[in-house]
Amino acid sequence: MRVLGIETSCDETGVAVYDSRDGLLAEALYSQVALHEKWGGVVPELASRDHVQRLLPLVDQVLAEARTAPEQLDGVAYTAGPGLAGALLVGACTARSLAFGWGIPALPVHHMEGHLLAPLLEEDPPAFPFVALLVSGGHTLLLEARGVGDYVPLGESVDDAAGEAFDKAAKMLGLGYPGGPRIAALAERGDPGRFRFPRPMTDRPGLDFSFSGLKTYCLNTIADCGGREALSEQDSADIARAFEEAVADTLMIKCRRAMEQTGLETLVIAGGVSANKRLRARLDQKLSSGGIRVCYPRLDLCTDNGAMIAFAGGLRLAAGERPDDLAIHVRARWPLAELNPVATDRPDENRGA
Ligand code: KG4
Ligand code: ZN
């Protein structure tokens, strides 16, 4: 089963070819960071237009690198949601048209399922059932993954997503977009003992998250230091460090609780924020030491990419799933729990490159 994967849900054009026997054959990513940077965040219309320009050349490039002719493909998988509607439509229209022309099925893929399954591309992939923490720019979800498409929600953010909180805190510190990696880099030089931010909603039972209060806390701390203009480099680094510590600790506490509640022994972390080194270290320190296996995708598969979409679509195609009709649908919002469970019992086919 060889699949072309297309990801255009936000500000990255991702394309990959995944083969269930030979693994990831080629992948390419075009990031729109430079395009959106001066606006301080993603401008949806600019994102859509840029996907239109980048996508087909990337498809050509990736097929050539994968030494794959269209006749060798069994399907095209594309992100159908959640995400920016215009950006999603570019990927959906392109994928559907290519697949129609090539006479193969086009399969809509849920972006968060792509993230969730990305760690299965690694050597020695985690086996179902496991607990998954999905932390991206738009979502913070804890769920029990019983199989492909069989996801039981355990908790979610009641307001901002973890990545969104990173992006907003970065903006307050004048670090620009995208915020997560910039806060993480600055926090390296920060003193962990100077400020202590709260760990929201950890003092009560439950697995939901709330990150919007950290934003206010960040704003107040900046004001206490005399306002953004008065911040020294060290002040900013100390605030970034305290903020990052608070998010990492909060996520770790809720994950530990989810492991206790479910009795499962494997935790999978995925989505852009799973690239955060302090979060990874905190989870390793507090959970791996307690006998929990913690699995992450490699760093370039944490953030948006075409490989995870090709892989997720490939699993569904291999299980016999086919699109209902030729209509092009995208969903800006799409709860993961609405997905159909898929019968896949193919550990030999879950291999990465
Ligand atoms: O999964 P992703 O690439 O796109 C979405 O599906 O949203 O996640 C992007 C989010 C952004 O909010 C970005 O700031 C955050 O992931 N992010 C990070 C790091 N790298 C990306 N947050 C914290 N630390 C990082 N190293
Ligand atoms: Zn994503």
Image (cartoon, helix red, strand yellow):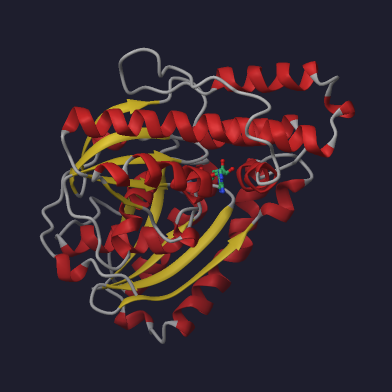
**In this picture, residue 315 sits left or right of residue 61:** left
**In this picture, residue 330 sits left or right of residue 191:** left
At 44% from the left and 35% from the top, the residue drawn is: 139
Which one is nearer the viewer's eye here, 31 or 82?
31
Taking 230 as reference, is 88 above or below it?
below
How far across and down, in percent of the image, does residue 227 sit?
Answer: 84, 21
Q: Is residue 197 visible?
A: yes
Task: State the quadrant of the N terminus.
Answer: bottom left
At 26% from the left and 30% from the top, the residue drawn is: 258
How far across and down, in percent of the image, does residue 313 sit?
Answer: 29, 59
What residue occupies the far top of the structure in this picture? 204
Which one is nearer the viewer's eye here, 155 or 96?
155
* Tally of marks: 0
- Picture quadrant of ligand 1: top right
How far across and down, in percent of the image, does residue 114 sit?
Answer: 36, 52
At 63% from the left and 34% from the top, the residue drawn is: 192
Task: State the quadrant of the C terminus.
Answer: bottom left
At 63% from the left and 63% from the top, the residue drawn is: 53
Which one is nearer the viewer's eye here, 170 or 9?
170
Taking 171 as reference, is 30 above or below it?
below
How far across and down, in percent of the image, does residue 34 sit?
Answer: 73, 55
**In this picture, residue 185 sits left or right of residue 9:** right
Q: Quadrant of residue 322?
A: bottom left
Q: Quadrant of residue 120?
A: bottom left
What residue occupies the far right of the structure in this picture? 230
Q: Is residue 329 visible?
A: no
Which one is nearer the viewer's eye here, 22 or 241?
241
